[in-house]
Each structure stands twice: as structure tokens, then as C-alpha cells.
């Protein structure tokens, strides 16, 4: 990885996530972030996993499910871009994904294992990309973005949602 992405490598729509991550070694940061997130989730009771701070909001299970869905989609985008594929990649509607995923009915242990698997998959993609691949650009959700900007977006998106869990869900 060649350090942090420049502002010219991504759109304002994902900039709010990317700009939350100041670390230079994104691979190390993503691994440490995974460990912190799992440590946050491990001691939760069933009631905490099912908690919603408002009736129409996602449960903790669904928030973590959203993180996994987003990471899988973003990792695919990162893989395509890093491999030089310039096919425009679509966006997605996170509410449709959440509605149809069934995360709320899953056991917490399964959710945590799936979360770990999703992150390990992201890290595997990152390990396989040569340094020059990180500067390749593609199009995702109608906007230009580089492979390294996608990696930082994954980290910043999770950071944002963990902050929400800590503030609104009282974790």
C-alpha cells in the first residue's frame, strides 16, 4: 500500500469515511480495527445484541450485518479496481440488504465469525495486490475511486458505525 489516498482519488460522498482514518498502514489498521470491534461485541448480552435505540432503527445485529454487507461489496470493488477492471460498479441500497439478510435472527457467535471472515477476505485481497495496483482507478456507485481509497473507505465506514453503536446504542 502506498499510504493515504489523495482527495483526488475519491468523491465527497465517501470522503467523510476516508477522512476519519489518519493511519498510514491501512492493512495494520484494518486488522487492529477487527480485533477492537470483536472485543466490543464479545461481552454483549442477547438483549444488547437485539437493542434498537428507536423502533425503526436497526438492531446491533443488523448494524454489524450492514458492516459485513458493505465490506463485502467494497472488497469486491477494491478487487476489481486493483485488477484493472474498469467496468462501472453499481451502488446498493443498504436498507434492502438489511431487510433481506436475516441478521436479526442470527446467533451473535455466527455474526462475529462472519464479521471476522469478511474482514479476513478483505485483508487477503489487499495482500495479493502489488503496490502499483493501489493507484488504479475505477468507478463505483457512479463516482471515480482508487483501490486504496476503497480500503480506507472500508475502515472509515466501520469507524463511523462503531461510534454510532457506542453513542446511540450505549455499547
Image (spheres, rainbow, N blue to C red):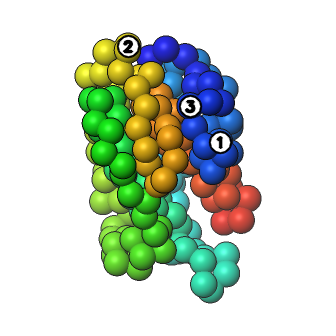
Query: Which residue does the image show at 37% across and 14% down from the upper left?
Result: 132
The answer to which of marks 2 and 1 sits earlier in the sequence is 1
Q: CA distance from mark 2 to mark 1?
A: 22 Å
Disc 3/disc 1 C-alpha distance (Å): 10 Å
The image position of residue 124, as x and y in percent, is 28, 30
> Residue at position x 65%, y 42% from top?
15
Image location of residue 113, percent across then percent down = 31, 51
The residue at the point 57 percent across, 25 percent down is: 5
Residue 107's x, y, as percent? 34, 68
Residue that numbered label 2 is attached to: 131
Crowding at dot 2, Cα within 10 Å, few <14 / some 14-19 / many 20+, comes out as some
Residue 148, compared with residue 170, is above or below; it is above
Label 2 SS: helix
Residue at disc 1, secondary structure = helix
Asked where in the image residue 85 lies, by quadrant, the reply is top left
Looking at the figure, which quarter contains the C terminus?
Answer: bottom right
Give the class, few, some or many, for how many residues have Cα within 10 Å of label 3's Cα (few <14, many ≥20). some
Q: CA distance from mark 3 to mark 2?
A: 16 Å
Q: Is residue 124 visible?
A: no
* Residue where numbered disc 3 is placed: 9
Q: Is residue 38 left or right of residue 107?
A: right
Q: Earlier in the sequence, mark 3 or mark 1?
A: 3
Residue in the foreground of this view, choosing between 97 and 106: 97
Q: Which of pointers 3 and 2 indicates the residue nearer the eye?
A: 3
> What residue is pinned by disc 1?
15
In the rendered structure, are the residues bearing label 3 and label 2 in contact, judged by CB atoms less than 8 Å apart?
no
Amino acid at each position: 500500500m502506498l499510504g493515504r489516498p489523495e482527495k483526488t482519488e475519491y468523491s465527497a460522498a465517501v470522503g467523510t469515511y476516508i477522512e476519519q482514518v489518519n493511519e498510514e498502514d491501512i492493512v495494520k489498521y484494518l486488522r487492529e480495527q477487527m480485533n477492537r470491534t470483536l472485543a466490543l461485541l464479545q461481552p454483549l448480552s442477547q438483549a444488547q445484541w437485539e437493542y434498537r435505540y428507536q423502533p425503526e432503527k436497526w438492531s446491533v445485529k443488523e448494524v454489524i450485518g450492514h458492516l459485513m454487507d458493505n465490506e463485502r461489496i467494497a472488497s469486491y470493488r477494491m478487487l476489481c479496481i486493483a485488477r484493472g477492471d474498469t467496468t462501472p460498479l453499481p451502488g446498493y441500497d443498504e436498507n434492502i440488504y438489511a431487510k433481506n439478510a436475516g441478521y436479526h435472527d442470527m446467533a451473535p457467535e455466527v455474526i462475529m465469525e462472519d464479521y471476522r471472515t469478511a474482514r479476513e477476505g478483505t485483508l487477503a485481497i489487499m495482500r495479493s495486490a502489488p503496490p502499483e495496483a493501489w493507484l488504479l482507478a475505477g468507478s463505483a456507485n457512479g463516482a471515480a475511486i482508487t483501490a486504496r481509497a476503497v480500503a480506507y473507505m472500508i475502515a472509515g465506514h466501520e469507524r463511523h458505525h462503531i461510534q454510532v453503536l457506542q453513542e446511540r446504542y450505549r455499547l
